[in-house]
Image (tube, grey):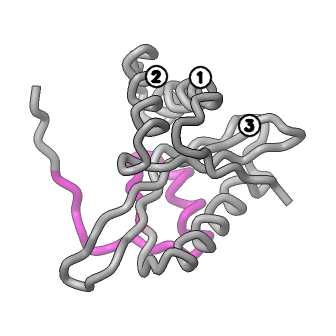
Amino acid sequence: MTPFILVAPNDLSFAETLTRFQVDMAMESEGLALDYARTLNGVRAVLQDETKGRYLVATLDDKPVGSLMLTREWSDWNCCWYLWIQSVYVSPDHRNKGIFKAMYNKVLELAASEGVTQVRLYVDRDNTKAQKVYQKLGMSECHYLLYETQIG
């Protein structure tokens, strides 16, 4: 079993690792070159303010091999919390070994213990490898489309 660390608020010890994971993930999955310093500031902001999110880190032999970020969304329609999985990354040499599956199951466990009724995530439409993983775990594409407006 893969040990997990739900990174505690204000624990900055994972900031560099999480930043590297995000920079690598963006390049690999979307061809985006993230600015390292800006991403590091974003990761630190989450680590210093739990209302922005929480990180779950998977480790093997005390070494981080994967991570994801969890954010909460309140549903006024259903009077309950939804949990969003974001910023998913598993290092290439640890893929296809059940790391994400273990992280996903841990998220479901956390969600159930926190009274969350839905776990959601979004994925780049061209990232078919990730989509297959999510489908294999029982997730299904929902009927919502995602729209955005860039400001600034």
**Residues in magenta?**
120-147
Residue denoted by label 3: 64
Residue denoted by label 2: 40
Looking at the image, which residue is at 56% across and 51% down?
129
Q: Nearer the viewer, residue 37 or 47?
A: 47
Q: Quick check: 14 left or right of 27?
A: right
Q: Quick check: 118 left or right of 55?
A: left
Are dots 1 and 3 in contact, CB under 8 Å? no
**Viewer can see residue 10:** yes
Q: Position of residue 55 (x, y in %)?
A: 55, 46
Amino acid tagged 2: Leu
Are dots 2 and 1 in contact, CB under 8 Å? yes
Q: Position of residue 101 (x, y in %)?
A: 68, 62
Looking at the image, which residue is at 52% across and 72% down?
111
- Rendered-image quadrant of the C terminus: top left
Q: Nearer the viewer, residue 43 or 9?
A: 9
- Residue 76 appears in which quarter of the rendering? bottom left
Q: CA distance from mark 1 to mark 3?
A: 11 Å
Looking at the image, which residue is at 42% across and 24% down?
39
Q: Nearer the viewer, residue 87 or 10?
A: 10
Looking at the image, which residue is at 47% across and 54% down?
70
Q: CA distance from mark 2 to mark 1?
A: 7 Å
Q: Residues within 10 Å of mark 1 (few under 14, many from 20)?
A: some
Residue denoted by label 1: 16
Secondary structure at numbered mark 1: helix
Mark 2 or 1, nearer chain start: 1
Vertical arrangement, residue 34 with respect to residue 110, above or below: above
Q: Position of residue 83 (x, y in %)?
A: 42, 66
Amino acid tagged 3: Pro
Q: Residue furthest right?
A: 61
Secondary structure at numbered mark 3: strand
